[in-house]
């Protein structure tokens, strides 16, 4: 395959960025999108040019590092798929593909296609954990929890913290990300103890980081590679309203 690429190049957070045209040649349809970028970078390095900076780690949909907007869609056109799982057979020979970084005030560009997502780490640090003594594995297994509740909690735990939900949202809201973490913990008895202080601390931190509010557009759910549902946001809102009335501190 031969593809025309328009790739965002930006030297650092404060430098102006722009889309630069590249041609990707001899691309196998079986390559992943990131392998295609590797081929382009090999060509640039051979010519003595600066390689395109992009983030990746696991390349199998687990780590959430591959934060690319492909043709205007975070993680590209396939539902429930990270961009590292996107394959070039999804495109046609001769296609033009635009590749940009996540766009959000709270995710400043580090270089080219890499953004700083440490704001998510600070939200988790604010409350996304259980600090009570939960005992060992036998203690956890001894607590009867309805299967449907366990399944919902585990589905919420599937969030990989990629930030696509923020990138897709016109408000750059982190609500889907936060609601996944809050649902995962609040649904389980071990997490209920700190549920109220947790939701307030995480929402306050998200505000401080510059993430926007939720206006129920649903763009986040549409691009989420782990298909986290926006019903979690409703649960988070209920938790927040409860926390405003009754403190567990
Ligand atoms: S909710 Fe989905 S899109 Fe948002 S950070 Fe988690 S996995 Fe990524
Ligand atoms: S590189 Fe880990 S999810 Fe894509």
Image: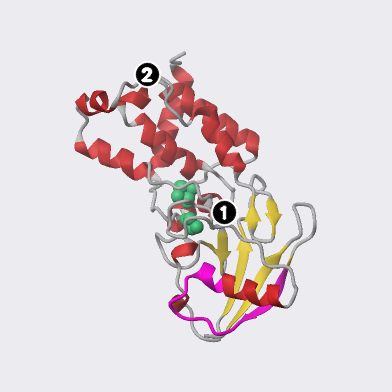
Q: Where is residue 28 in the image (x, y as percent from the top left)?
A: 48, 81
Report how far apart the C-alphas of labels 2 and 1 lie in the structure. 36 Å
Q: Mark 2 points at which residue?
A: 133
The 10 Å Cα crowd at callout 2, few under 14, some 14 to 19, many 20 or more, is: few
Q: Mark 1 points at which residue?
A: 167
- Say whether residue 216 is visible: no
For numbered disc 1, what is the local secondary structure?
helix
User: Does the closest atom of ligand 1 sit within 8 Å of the Cβ of label 2?
Assistant: no
Query: On screen, 85 above or below 150?
Result: below
Question: What segment carries the magenta color?
Answer: 19-37
Viewer-nearest of discs 2 and 1: 2
- Say whether residue 14 is visible: yes
- Residue 8's quadrant in the figure? bottom right
- Residue 40's quadrant in the figure? bottom right
The 10 Å Cα crowd at callout 1, few under 14, some 14 to 19, many 20 or more, is: many
Q: Which residue is drawn at 55% across and 49% down?
A: 166
For numbered disc 2, what is the local secondary structure?
loop
Q: Residue at x 57, y 63 (%)?
A: 69
Q: Where is residue 189 in the image (x, y as percent from the top left)?
A: 30, 25
Q: Is residue 176 left or right of residue 150?
A: right
Q: Which residue is drawn at 58% across and 70% down?
A: 38
């Amino acid at each position: 395959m031969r593809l025309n690429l328009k790739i965002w190049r930006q030297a650092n957070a404060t430098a102006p960025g722009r889309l630069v045209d590249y041609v990707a040649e001899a691309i196998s349809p079986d390559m992943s999108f990131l392998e295609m970028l590797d081929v382009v970078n090999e060509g640039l390095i051979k010519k003595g040019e600066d390689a395109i900076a992009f983030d990746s780690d696991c390349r199998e949909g687990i780590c959430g590092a591959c934060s690319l907007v492909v043709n205007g869609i975070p993680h590209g056109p396939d539902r429930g798929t990270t961009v590292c799982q996107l394959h070039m057979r999804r495109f046609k020979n001769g296609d033009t593909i635009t590749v940009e970084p996540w766009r959000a005030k709270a995710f400043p560009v580090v270089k080219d296609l890499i953004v700083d997502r440490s704001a998510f780490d600070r939200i988790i640090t604010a409350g996304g954990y259980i600090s009570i003594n939960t005992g060992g594995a036998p203690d956890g297994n001894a607590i009867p929890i309805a299967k449907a509740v366990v399944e919902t909690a585990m589905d919420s735990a599937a969030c990989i913290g990629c930030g696509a939900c923020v990138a897709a949202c016109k408000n750059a809201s982190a609500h889907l990300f936060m609601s996944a973490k809050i649902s995962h913990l609040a649904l389980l008895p071990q997490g209920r103890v700190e549920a109220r202080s947790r939701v307030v601390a995480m929402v306050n931190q998200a505000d401080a980081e510059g993430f926007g509010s939720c206006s129920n557009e649903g763009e986040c759910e549409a691009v989420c590679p782990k298909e986290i549902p926006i019903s979690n946001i409703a649960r988070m809102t209920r938790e927040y309203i409860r926390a405003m009335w009754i403190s567990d501190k």
